[in-house]
Amino acid sequence: MTSYRTNLKVQQANSFYNYTVGLDVMDVDLVKTATNLLKSKIARTVCFSDLKCVYLDVDGCVQLEWLRPQGRQWDSHWEVKFSDNLPRHTAADLLFCLELSFLEQRIESPEARQMPSHLRAALPPLVLERDGLTLPIHPWLKLYSDGILIISFQLDAEWSGLDEGDFIQEIVNLFQQYFDRVWVQEHLQRIDAEQELLSDLGSKLSIGGQRVASRKTQKLVKKIRRDGRAVLEESLGKCGRAFDISGESWVLHQIAGSEGQSDWEATIDLCRSIYVRAVASLVTVSGRTWVGRAPQAQLWQGRPSISLMRFVDQPDSKEKLLEEFGPSISRVLGRHGELEDPPALPPDLRMFGDYCFHGDRALLLWTWLRTQDQPDNVWEEDNTQGRLLENQARAEHFEYHNLRIARACATASSPKSDEDLVEAYRVLAGAEAVIHHSGQAGEITDALDYLLAAAGTRGLIASGKEQARWHLDERRYRAERKRGRVDRWLTGVFGLVGVAGFADLVVKPLLTDMYPERGEAWTGLYAFALSFAVVGLVAVLIWIINILRR
């Protein structure tokens, strides 16, 4: 009987809590959106997928930086020369974006062109506090031109040996943990609060799902908005608290209205809501020249991508890892630390012997191996950052394709416009081909195929296409009925014109010769009536013949 190790002692781990959001727009103007992000002060640097960058200089002016890497991709080597006047924090953000861009090009070749253009931006950090514990979180934004955005909350932590159950509860299931205080940037809170106050608050006042609309309701809505603005100004009017995060000082404020509250929903999901709504309100749709409704989140999905970098008795081979820590890895994947008999592990999605990659619809888990010559502190290795970002690039690759298909299925079930319906059908019809050509390596394609099936998204494609086809057929039927009504009216109009022409050119001259004593007006009237009767009789005969042929 095989003896399994029943407890995992985690020493160093990296977590990206990825929240993928599908907006209800599919044509984003990335340049104008980047300008809005800079002007709103929730981003200082924005890097585009074509390696152009816009940033704020020390004077607050928008500047452009053209990044031109030198080197060969398969040598894993790029050299980039920055401008001399580039701010230090901008250079740090660009290094992060460049490394991810390099890894993304290794995942998907530029010839495939399955991924649309996108932008990246470092968002202001947030801080979670509870019982003397302070967790600084680094959010990153990735926005695609087709209206899909990914907000990743990055957390790096280390312990002397964190128990497996505590690791699952405190880190893997971080979204379930309540905190005493949550510190977020002032500008983000203001943008989010404005969107909430400008929303239709009256629709939320209902009884049994039925909206209550009256003069008292309107007064109540006005009072709620007035009180909300007062609380917002009072909370954000106070001096914030300075935090030293990654060597830089940030002034953050508690979430407005949370001071002194002990029973509010102080979770990272609340932060996700704030960041998503603030970013979505700054998204500009291509071709829209008027100020209208801000894009809304149509649906979102979230799952962490966790790298177990160091743990006690870490083996140097996959065989030892799965033999000794198989049940522990299964518990982490199941996000449940008290499973006495955890299920069997899913297949390892990494073909090579450097680490294990397991994933399902709830979690993406990267378990590293360690040879004897590697240091205890993983950050002493030069390639640690690159390995972590390689994992994150793979995670974003899956998250994008997963939500792209899921959003298309949601749109196909209840399309808002014909353009959205056609785009959803196009996405679903080409989903299989896109998955097949999603990566340059068979491992990447196979991993994506497995994860989409594990998440249940793969099974939605067939039903989504059927729903889209039904709506297309319904719209075609309605269009044909409308066109049939128009055709009947046009037939009647041109029939009257034909009757009048026949009466004027043929019947009226005959009646004038036969009855010259009649007046011209009466002759014309009789000619039209006789022509109408003849044409009507012919039409009735044709109608009867068509019925008999059926």
Image: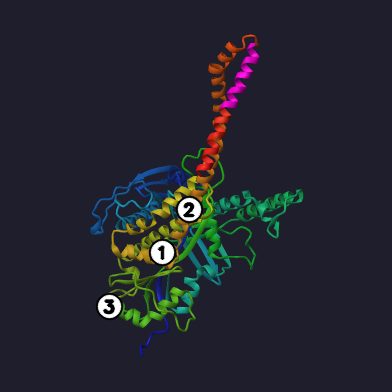
Quarter of the figure that contains the N terminus:
bottom left
Count neighbours of disc 3 (C-alpha within 10 A) and say few if under 14, some if 14 to 19, many if 20 or more: few
Seen from the viewer's position, the closer of residues 283 and 462 is: 462
Kind of residue sitting beneath label 1: Leu
Labels 3, 2: front one: 2
Left or right position of 55 against 384: right
User: Is the residue 548 above or below the residue 249 in the image?
Assistant: above
In this image, 62 relative to 209: left or right?
left
Disc 1: which residue: 452
Q: Which mark is residue 372?
A: 3
Q: Which residue is situated farthest in the top direction here?
A: 517
Inter-mark Cα distance, 2 to 1: 20 Å
Image point (30%, 68%), residue name? 381
Magenta-drawn stretch, dominant element (helix, strand or loop): helix
Provide the residue designation for mark 2: 468
Reading the chain from its start, which is encountered first: label 3 or label 1? 3
Q: Are marks 3 and 1 in contact (CB under 8 Å)?
A: no
Q: Residues within 10 Å of mark 1 (few under 14, many from 20)?
A: many
